Amino acid sequence: MFSFLRRKNTTTDGLEAYEEIAEKKTTSAGYLLLIVMGIFIIVVGQTIFSDLRHIPTLPINPAYCTNNFIEDYKSLRNTDQCSFGSIDREFGIEEQVNQILPSLQTIAKLNSEINDLNYRNSRLTHQIEQAQTQYDVSLQEKMAKEEVLYNRSGIQQSITSLRNSVEANTSTIAGLQTQLQSEISKVEPFIIPLKTAYEQAQNSYASKYAWYRIKVFCLMLLFVLPIFIFATRWYLSLKKRNSPYTIIATSVMGSFAILFLQVVLVFLYDIIPHTWIEKIFKIFQSTPILRYILYYGTVFLVVALFGGIVYLIQRRIFDSKKTAIRRLKDSKCPTCSFTINQFEDYCPKCGTTLKETCPHCNNKRIALLPFCPVCGKTKSQNTPPAPTV
Ligand SMILES: [Zn+2]
Ligand SMILES: [Zn+2]
């Protein structure tokens, strides 16, 4: 991951970037295998995460049907069987609900009966309207002395019977409404204590759930952080030695960096109040200028964060002496990368001293390299000034 980024971050000098990559590169098959390995680590990490989520006991929320009873007890249509848990028993919710459950069931029954009758009445009213139209048509036929198609007395009879049904239904509804009101008034005094208990249970659940999240976060961190630290140290030590195996460590470290980031971000998202984030996000989303500020701000932040990390690594790793020697090996000036030849004592471009006199044998020797090519001795004098990278 980082060597990929590095390529982009050190292109102040194209040659240097090329040289640095050249020593670490692998074949396409190698890259592919490393990518597959990284993906595998991340996928296995997800499996382990979901396993870790099961280790602390997940608190069970209070039964939601209680909330329905509290909010809609007047207009209940059905009382589906509640499945109460330990938290409902702890706060006496189950007991309280069971006390009013017969009344609630009656309310639900009455409500559905009333609803049924209302529906039937609306259909009957529609039928009456149709019959009325037929009757009007038959009257017009009579006035026009046309052949009578409709049986007028039959229509009148059916209209009367339909109206009677509507009236009967309406009076039944009124009776049911009275029963309903009396049931509602029976339930009413129980609602406020039930609401209080339910709110207490919800608060208790919220704090239990917060603890659960913290426990899961700690477990995940325990799994991911040591390996991440280990992989990073491994990566740094390989990179310091300029090892060709650095890329393997890079892949491992990158994968664990992603897992680590996931754990931290999910936890942060959990503990920061969502409503605030969502509100702020909505404000940003609704105003185009703010939206672009948000987008650019995010990009800038990510670049600053990752660039900063890479910069710190680069600064630790980029040994100016090693770079200089690598350049010499390719017949380039250690300071400016200009192509040099073995007969030059100074770089023709920047004037850096390339050769100096050996203090032991008085022959010319390459200033930066540790051994004299003629007498094989190391020089005991000062090392030449380190080239700037
Ligand atoms: Zn030079
Ligand atoms: Zn010598």
Image: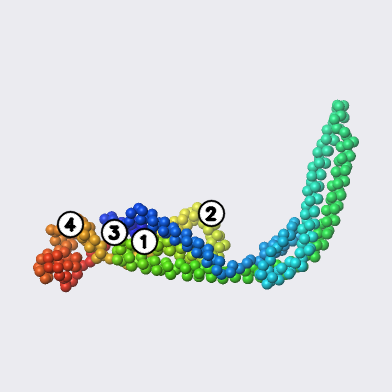
Secondary structure under the numbered disc 1 in the rendered image: helix
Closest to the camera, between mark 4 and mark 1, is 1
Q: What distance separates the C-alpha of mark 4 from that of mark 2?
A: 61 Å
**Mark 3 residue type:** Glu
Q: Position of residue 89 (x, y in %)?
A: 69, 70
Q: What distance separates the C-alpha of mark 4 from that of mark 1?
A: 35 Å
Q: Residues within 10 Å of mark 2 (few under 14, many from 20)?
A: few
- Which residue carries the number 1 mark? 248
Secondary structure under the numbered disc 2 in the rendered image: helix
Image point (46%, 56%), residue name:
295
Closest to the camera, between mark 1 and mark 2, is 1
Disc with the residue nearer the chain's start (4 vs 1): 1
Disc with the residue nearer the chain's start (1 vs 3): 3
Q: Is residue 365 above or below residue 150?
A: below
**Mark 2 residue type:** Ser
Secondary structure under the numbered disc 3 in the rendered image: helix
Disc with the residue nearer the chain's start (4 vs 2): 2
Closest to the camera, between mark 1 and mark 3, is 1
User: Which residue is nearer to you in this view: 211 or 349?
Assistant: 211
Q: Quadrant of the N terminus?
A: bottom left
Disc with the residue nearer the chain's start (3 vs 4): 3
Q: What distance separates the C-alpha of mark 1 from that of mark 3?
A: 14 Å
- Which residue carries the number 3 mark? 23
Image point (14%, 65%), residue name:
373
Closest to the camera, between mark 3 and mark 2, is 3
Q: Position of residue 102 (x, y in %)?
A: 78, 63
- Which residue carries the number 4 mark? 340
- Which residue carries the number 2 mark? 286
**Mark 4 residue type:** Ile
